[in-house]
Image (spheres, rainbow, N blue to C red):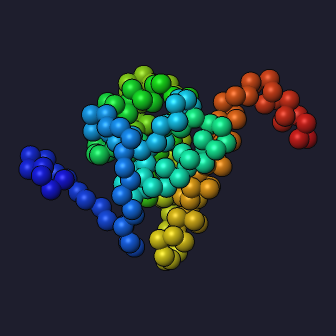
């Protein structure tokens, strides 16, 4: 952002100590690939300071037998076309950001995917649009479900639902009654 002189830019710094550097396993035209398990089940997009959480989520998914690709886009708007291509080749796309969900990166990505005709299911994790009680960053992330454990648990449920036929879902619903 410091070297850009022909467009507006912003650099966000979260409160607290900076996360450790994460070494990318690959670079794809402006997108750092932080983890790649080989199987294209879930694309996890970690934005900014949430990249480390995204890697943790990806590792948890791989441990559960779910393939994961974790990426960190170097910029968020406009959406890098590489993300659209990656999304089209995965079964589920998940974005993780410590920004508001409404008007955030996840919402922007979802709109870009729809505009590009990419039909991969999409889930975004971010801060809900509501007043939050004052607390330390870690506490707020925990309260809003933005921990690696909570996000990975939700993704496992989402992938399981993708693998479940509509008839099986109806049968499960009827059994619960």
Dividing the picture into quadrants, the one containing residue 106 is top left
Q: Is residue 42 left or right of residue 156?
A: left
Quadrant where the image shows the C terminus: top right
Residue 165, x across and y down, in percent: 74, 24
Q: Is residue 13 left or right of residue 34?
A: left
Residue at 55% across, 29% down: 39
Residue at 39% across, 26% down: 85
Residue 1, x across and y down, in percent: 19, 53
Residue at 52% across, 36% down: 37
Asked if residue 101 shows in the view, the reply is no
* Viewer-side residue, 37 vs 147: 37
* Viewer-side residue, 95 vs 61: 61
Asked if residue 48 shows in the view, the reply is yes
Residue 87, x across and y down, in percent: 45, 30
Residue at 57% across, 35% down: 67
Residue 146 sits above or below residue 160 on the image? below
Dividing the picture into quadrants, the one containing residue 16 is bottom left
In the current view of this chain or complex, which residue is farthest to the left?
5
Q: Is residue 109 left or right of residue 119?
A: left
């Amino acid at each position: 952002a410091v070297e850009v002189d022909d467009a507006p830019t912003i650099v966000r710094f979260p409160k607290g100590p900076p996360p450790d550097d994460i070494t990318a396993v690959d670079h794809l035209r402006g997108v750092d690939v932080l983890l790649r398990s080989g199987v294209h089940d879930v694309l996890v997009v970690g934005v900014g300071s949430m990249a480390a959480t995204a890697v943790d989520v990806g590792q948890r998914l791989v441990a559960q037998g779910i393939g994961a690709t974790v990426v960190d886009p170097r910029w968020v708007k406009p959406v890098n076309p590489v993300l659209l291509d990656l999304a089209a080749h995965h079964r589920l796309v998940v974005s993780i950001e410590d920004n508001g969900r409404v008007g955030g990166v996840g919402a922007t990505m979802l709109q870009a995917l729809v505009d590009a005709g990419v039909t991969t299911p999409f889930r975004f994790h971010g801060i809900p649009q509501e007043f939050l009680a004052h607390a330390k960053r870690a506490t707020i992330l925990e309260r809003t479900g933005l921990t690696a454990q909570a996000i990975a648990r939700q993704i496992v449920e989402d992938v399981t639902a993708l693998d479940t036929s509509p008839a099986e879902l109806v049968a499960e619903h009827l059994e619960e009654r």
